[in-house]
Amino acid sequence: FALDSLLAVGFLLALVTGLGAISMGTRFLTSTHYSLHLAWLGEIELASAALFDFGVFLVVVAVGRIFLLRFAAWQALSFSGNAQGYKK
């Protein structure tokens, strides 16, 4: 997965989850709960807040990795003497 795609998917997941509550006639980011019955696991409770949290998690991971990769590239350039503003 490319980092920009991960960032976009996380942002859209969080946004759609938050706006989904408005489409149901409640306030923005109001959590709803669903019950799902699976034959091999039984009854499972799902909350829309978990989807929102997962979207935020994806955004944080993508931004963190972008920061670390750019910082590492900047460090590599500064040690080779090619970074902007580098003085010998």
Image (cartoon, rainbow, N blue to C red):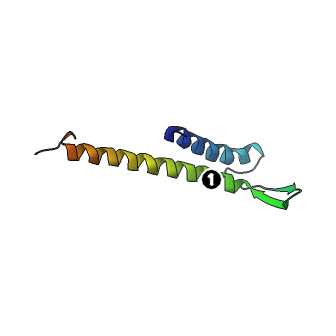
Say whether residue 71 is left or right of residue 79.
right
Task: Name which quarter of the figure residue 34 lies in.
Answer: bottom right
Say whether residue 67 is left or right of residue 41.
left
Residue at position x 72%, y 53% in the image = 48
| Residue 26: % across, % down | 75, 50
Say whether residue 71 is left or right of residue 81.
right
The residue type indicated by label 1 comes to: Phe
| Residue 83: % across, % down | 22, 41
Residue at position x 43%, y 45% in the image = 66
Q: Give SS at disc 1.
A: helix
The total of numbered circles placed on residues is 1
In this rendered view, identify the residue nearer to me: 24 or 60: 60
| Residue 73: % across, % down | 32, 44
Say whether residue 5 is left or right of residue 84.
right
Residue at position x 80%, y 60% in the image = 45
Q: Is residue 39 above or below residue 72?
A: below
* Residue extending farthest right: 39
Residue at position x 64%, y 52% in the image = 52
| Residue 3: % across, % down | 50, 41
Which quadrant would the N terminus be assigned to in this image? top right
Name the residue beneath numbered marker 1.
Answer: 54
The residue carrying pointer 1 sits among few (fewer than 14), some (14 to 19) or many (20 or more) residues within 10 Å by Cα, namely some
Which quadrant would the C terminus be assigned to in this image? top left
